[in-house]
Image (cartoon, rainbow, N blue to C red):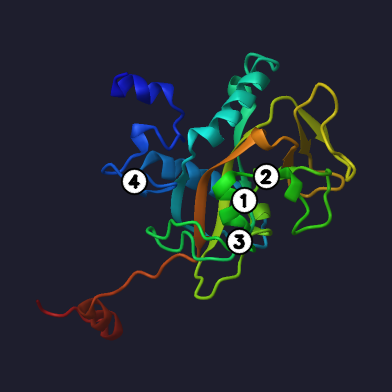
Amino acid sequence: MSTSSLKSSLDSFSLDNPINSRSGKRSRLVHIEREDPQFAEVQQLFNKGWRHRKKDRPYVQTVFKVLWPNTVLEPYLQYRSEVESTVRARDRSGNEKLLFHGTNRACLLGEKPNNVLLCGLRECYLCSILRTSFDITKCGAKNTFKRFGHGIYTTVCSSKADDYSHSGAENVNFRVMLVSRVVLGKAYRRYRNAPDLIKPPSGYHSVAGETGWDLNYEETVCYDNDAIRPAYLVVYGEEPLVAMNFKAFISTMFKTPLAS
């Protein structure tokens, strides 16, 4: 098979896709340069999704693309294909959306562009998710209240996901958040809490929590592990200070330009 045909046959988040290789090296997390259109896409989603008026919107420091071995990726693609065949034609790719998820990080993953190795700490939910994807059996491990029952929760609202993003390691400067590909299929819209749900109603693939009654910000719940795969890791925090050189510092202090 030629390289061009191999590229087209593999998903863009596949670890085996040549487009994701860097000088022959393969890594589960690939640092995306700020000039890359993918960075702009994720940053725009993050900024647009920051809806809490009382929370200052932070600066997107870094974005990593999450790659998967085909053994983990293929069940998701198969599920997406099956859902796509049952929803309306206009819902391409099974109505797949990019949605946010905040979780615990117990290490320094993502703090710098070269911090890409997953840790083995039991309390690091982030690395656990990035290693094998989401596990619905762990629902409620951190939060006992499950508004729409036993499922995997995501949201279009990045500032809501931020409420669940926690970093427990020392010397942490930033926060992190996952952006996942989620197959919504035909979403069942709910305005009231339904904590006993273990699956969506018959004929639906997910539950969409709508604002107005029990919810201030939207959230989406899927009830199948193969309905979701992390796609990006966003590292965010305060905007970095621009370093001044010595001449600029003296000039600013005394309001007088220095001779060259």
* Residue type at numbered disc 3: Cys
Question: First in sequence: mark 3 or mark 2?
Answer: 3
* Location of mark 2 (residue): 155
* Location of mark 4 (residue): 35
* Location of mark 3 (residue): 124
Q: Secondary structure at mark 1?
A: helix
Tell me which corner region of the image, top left, top right, bottom left or bottom right, holds residue 23.
Answer: top left
Q: Secondary structure at mark 4?
A: loop
Spatial CA distance of label 1 from label 4 is: 22 Å
Labels 3, 4: front one: 3
* Location of mark 1 (residue): 158
Q: Nearer the viewer, residue 240 or 110?
A: 110
Spatial CA distance of label 3 from label 4 is: 31 Å
Q: Which mark is residue 257?
A: none
Q: Residue furthest bottom?
A: 254
Please name the residue shown 65% across and 47% down the image: 157
